[in-house]
Image: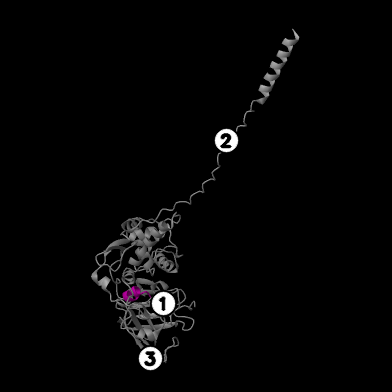
Amino acid sequence: MTAKLRAMFLLTACLAAATACSEPAPKAQKKPPAPAVKPAAPKPPPVVPAAPAGAAQAKTVNAARFDPAAATPWAKRGYLIRAQVLLDRAHFSPGVIDGQEGSNLAIAVAAFQESRRLTVDGKLSPAVWDALVGADAGPALTTYTITAQDAAGPFVASIPKDDYEAMAKLPALSYTSPLEALAEKFHMDEALLQSLNPGVDFGKAGTSIVVAALGPDGLDGKVTRVDIDNAKGVLKAYGDGGRLLAVYPATVGSTERPAPVGEWAVNTVAPRPTYTYDPSRLTFGKPKTKLTIQPGPNNPVGSTWIDLTKDTYGIHGTPDPKLVNKRASHGCVRLTNWDAAELGAAGVKGARVIFHGKPAR
C-alpha cells in the first residue's frame, strides 16, 4: 500500500469513529408510575332491619311469639307489647303498655303465674306465654279512627308541675293534647303510640291509627275486698268467695307519709273529683291557704277518687301513669287513671280495704 493510500484509510477510520461517538445516547426510559394503592373500604355496620310501620307493625305484633333470643329491639318489643295487652285484657294490669320490660310487667306476670299455678318469678317463659295465648288468641293491636271529639278536647296548654296555686287558677285539669288523651284511652305510653303511627297527626279527625286492642270495660263481678301490699306496690281486688278479679301496680305511700297497716273500708267513690289542698291537714306543698283544684285527668288525684274510712286516705288515679310504682305518693294509693276508674266502677263502696306489709320506702 502506498503512503498516500494508507493516509486516506486512516482518515476514513477516524471519521467513522468520530461519527459513532457523536450519536446521542439513548434517553433513559421513565418507569411507569406505580398504580395508586386504594385504602381498603371500611366495613359497613351490620344492617338492622327498620321497624315496620303502621299496619305492618300491627301484623307483626299480632303474630309475635315469645323469643328471648330476639335479634332486634323491635322484634323483642313485639312480643312484649302482645304480652302486656293480653295481661291487661285479663285484668292483670301491666300499668302503661310500652313494649318494655320493667317492674310493673313483672308484677302482672307474677300474679298471672300465681293464678295459673305456675312457678312464680315474674318472668315471661314458654309456659307463661302458652297460658296467655291459650286463654286469649285475639289480636293485641287493632285500628281506631280518631273522632271529632278526640280531636276537639277540651285541652289545656300545660299543667303547672307541683304548683297547686297555679293549678287552682285553671278551669279544668284536662289533657294537654290529643296524643295524651288517646294514649290514656288505650292504656298506652305516648312514645309507643307515636312509634306505631309514625308521622300521624293525632288531632285530625277521621285518621286511622294503630292502638292496643283492649277488652270489654269493667270487671267480672263486684269488688268486696281490696288487698294492698305496701312493700311490693300491688293492689288486688277480690269478689265474692275470695275470687280474684284484678291486680294493679300501685304507688303506696312515701317515706314522709308511709302507708298504714290495718283494715278500713271504702267510704265512697267520686268520678271526676275536685282536689282540695288544705295546709292544716297536709304536710307537703307550699300554699298557706286552702285551695280547690278542678276536675280532670291531670288533677293531682287523677280522674277517680276512692275515699277510705281512714281520714285523708284514698285510692286514686294519677296525671303521670308511667310513674305508677316508680315514684312515691303523698301517702295514698295511686293507680293509673284507667285502673282506678275500673276499680271504682266495680261496686267497690263498702268493700274491705286491707293494708299489709312493711312499706319499701
Residue 26 lies in quadrant: top right
Mark 3 or mark 2, earlier in chain: 2
Q: Is residue 339 above or below residue 15?
A: below
Can you identify the residue that label 1 sits on?
228
Q: Position of residue 22 (x, y in %)?
A: 66, 25
- Residue 168: quarter of image: bottom left
Q: Of the residues under marks 2 and 1, which one precedes in the sequence?
A: 2
Which residue shows up at 41% across the image and 58% down it? 74
Badge 1 marks a residue whose secondary structure is strand
**Observer-nearest of 71 and 205:** 205
| Mark linked to residue 290 | 3
Q: CB of mark 3 within 8 Å of CB of mark 2?
A: no
The magenta region covers: 334-342
What residue sits 43% from the left and 61% below the top? 124
**Secondary-structure class at tag 3:** loop
Q: Which sits in the foreground, 57 or 2?
A: 2
Dot in front, 3 or 2:
2
Q: Quadrant of residue 193?
A: bottom left
Under mark 1, the amino acid is Ile
Badge 1, how many Cα within 10 Å: few under 14, some, many 20+? many
Query: Would you say the magenta stretch is mainly helix, strand or loop?
Result: helix
Q: Please, what is the three-letter code of the amino acid marked with disc 2?
A: Pro
Residue where numbered disc 2 is placed? 32
Percent position (x, y) of residue 151?
A: 27, 71
- Position in image of residue 56 (x %, y %): 33, 55
Let me know if residue 336 is in the magenta part. Answer: yes
Between label 1 and label 3, give the one nearer the viewer.
Answer: 3
Q: Is residue 105 above or below residue 293?
A: above
